[in-house]
Amino acid sequence: MNSPYSIIFFQGERSWRCRPFLAVVSLLIMSLQIGILGPLGSASAAAPEEALEAWFPPPLPGWSATGAEVILDDSQITQVQKTYRRKADGAEMVISILSSKVALEPEEKAVIEQMGSRLGAKPFIHQGIKGLLLSADGMSVLKFFLNGAKIEVDLMLDRMDTNPVTAYGRLLDLHGAERLFGK
């Protein structure tokens, strides 16, 4: 099911095209975390850079990676990401962690899961934690909610190819993310 509509996000020189659903879900999560649910405390007492870098998986053969970068770290929310690039075709994947003190309400998380299911998202279990895997409209996404949905881990590939997304997903230490960001 291809949507004639898409939304483009820009970050520096990179851009991501995604379905309106994915944009709405991302904006919903950000809105819930930075205001609608009330003030948030410090998300992670700024984990040391070495610990952040060590959490991300090394590049798979045929891939390169940038260093982990803190995109946002303030009293309300923390976001850290690392970008991977496949040398053969330039495919780009971003693995990011978004952390806050306030979790999504169970009903809000259920709405996100139901919307994902309507678009063909499939469950992906890793380390006993259920994630959602979706490949549509030119991109593949794997999403995990951790620590009572206070931590969101996303893997986003700019291609409809779930193989690298699941390969990197299997390398993630989700319990380590909870320890690193679950304060």
Image: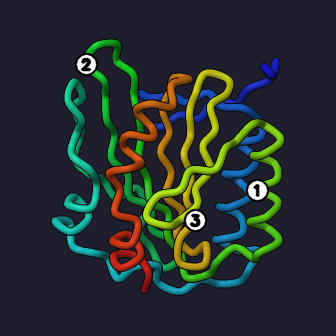
Query: Which mark sits nearer the N-terminus, 3 or 2?
Result: 2
Q: Nearer the viewer, residue 50 or 31?
A: 50
Q: Secondary structure at mark 2?
A: loop
The answer to whether the residue labelled 2 contacts the one labelled 1, judged by CB atoms less than 8 Å apart, is: no
Residue drawn at (72%, 51%) of the image? 25
Pointer 2 residue: 87
Looking at the rendering, in which quadrant would you find the C terminus?
bottom left
Q: Residues within 10 Å of mark 1 (few under 14, many from 20)?
A: some
Disc 3 secondary structure class = strand
In the displayed structure, 39 sits above or below 123; it is: below
Asked which quadrant contains residue 56, the reply is bottom left
Tell me if 82 is positioned left or right of 128 in this view: left
Q: Answer with mark 2 or mark 1, whichever residue precedes in sequence.
A: 2
Q: Decide: marks 3, 1 in contact (CB < 8 A)?
A: no
User: Could you tell me how far apart the alpha carbons at marks 3 and 1 are, in whole angstroms?
Assistant: 11 Å
Look at label 3 and name its amino acid: Phe
Q: Earlier in the sequence, mark 3 or mark 1?
A: 1
Vertical arrangement, residue 50 with respect to residue 180, above or below: above
**Amino acid type of the residue that numbered disc 2 sits on in the rendered structure:** Lys
- From the image, tell me which residue sits under label 3: 145
Q: Which residue is mark 1?
A: 112
Kind of element beneath mark 1: helix
The span from disc 2 to disc 1 (Cα, nearest Å) is 33 Å
Residue 134: x, y in percent? 64, 38
